[in-house]
């Protein structure tokens, strides 16, 4: 009798497990994805070089003839997705001191504006080249405004309190009386990947992929590049 009961209980458990709704399973299988690695051209190849921040910067003078060269590649580790478009965005970070003497920074692009589009990217793990110039930045943000006095909106590139240097659209740190009252114009590049399936990948895990400090490899990835004016 006990043996019959045990067999019946085992069958009942197996029946319950077999009828389990898989849509309720919290352990979902991993879906395919893609990520990207963006670098300053000529920097990432130097082993453990810091290729994510200020490896290249706009100069203080001669900006009309200057540019920064970049490279970006998309990576599909399992080769299940193909990237058909890479959108490059750039945000401009304005720095100033408010009427109360507090240092302030403001994102003029709300996370970034589209500055370049790569419509036919190279194959998996192959580099795509692009460049940015001060003129590109100016075109995107020439009408951006900031309420420096907390009341009146003033165009950033026409701010009388911080006039732009002659022959330069972008400027370095502002020093008054030996004290830095505003840091240099700063910029953040990010990207979005669109696959042939119509999937869009923007920002990944901030604590791992975006801040990966390891040397450049086939699986390496990041989410942004930072640069400034020096």
Image: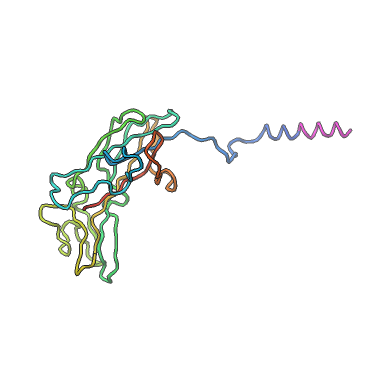
Name the side, left or right, on which 215 lies relative to 146. Answer: right
Residue drawn at (38%, 29%), measured in percent from left and top?
82
Q: Give the left or right position of residue 76, taking residue 102 as reference.
A: right
Image location (x, y in percent) of residue 118:
27, 34
Q: What are the residue bounds of the magenta stretch?
A: 1-11
- Toward the front, the furthest residue is 47
Residue at image point 31% right, 46% down: 225
Q: Is residue 2 magenta?
A: yes
Question: Is residue 145 or residue 207 the one in the foreground?
Answer: 207
When asked about the image quadrant of residue 203, the answer is top left
Quick check: 161 above or below 167?
A: below
Q: How far from the left and from the top, in percent, is residue 172?
A: 20, 56
- Residue 124 picture location, percent across and down: 36, 29
- Is-magenta flag for residue 220? no
Residue lying at the far bottom in this picture: please name it: 100
Using the image as rendered, state which of residue 123 and residue 180 is in the foreground: 180
Q: Residue furthest left?
A: 166
| Image colouring | rainbow
- Tell me what residue is drawn at x 34 percent, y 28 percent: 123
User: Which image quadrant for residue 16?
Assistant: top right
| Chief SS of the magenta region | helix
Relative image position of residue 20 (x, y in whole percent): 65, 35
Task: Please identify the quadrant where the N terminus is shown.
Answer: top right
Tally the marks. Answer: 0
């Amino acid at each position: 009798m006990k043996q019959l009961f045990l067999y019946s209980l085992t069958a009942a458990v197996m029946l319950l497990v077999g009828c389990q709704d898989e849509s309720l399973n919290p352990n979902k299988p991993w879906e395919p994805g893609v990520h990207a690695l963006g670098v300053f051209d000529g920097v990432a190849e130097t082993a453990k070089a810091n290729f994510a921040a200020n490896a290249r910067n706009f100069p203080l003078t001669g900006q009309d003839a200057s540019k920064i060269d970049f490279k970006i590649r998309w990576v599909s580790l399992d080769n299940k997705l193909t990237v058909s478009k890479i959108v490059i965005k750039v945000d401009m970070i304005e720095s100033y001191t408010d009427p109360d003497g507090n240092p302030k920074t403001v994102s003029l692009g709300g996370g970034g504006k589209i500055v370049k589009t790569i419509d036919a990217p190279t194959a998996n793990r192959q580099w795509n080249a692009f460049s940015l110039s001060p003129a590109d930045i100016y075109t995107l943000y020439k009408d951006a405004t900031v309420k420096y006095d907390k009341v009146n909106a003033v165009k950033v590139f026409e701010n009388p309190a911080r006039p732009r240097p002659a022959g330069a659209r972008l400027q370095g740190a502002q020093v008054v009386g030996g004290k830095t009252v505003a840091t240099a114009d700063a910029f953040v590049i990010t990207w979005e990947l669109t696959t042939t399936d119509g999937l869009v990948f923007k920002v990944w895990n901030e604590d791992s992929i975006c801040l990966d400090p390891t040397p450049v490899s086939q699986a390496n990835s990041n989410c942004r590049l930072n640069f400034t004016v020096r």
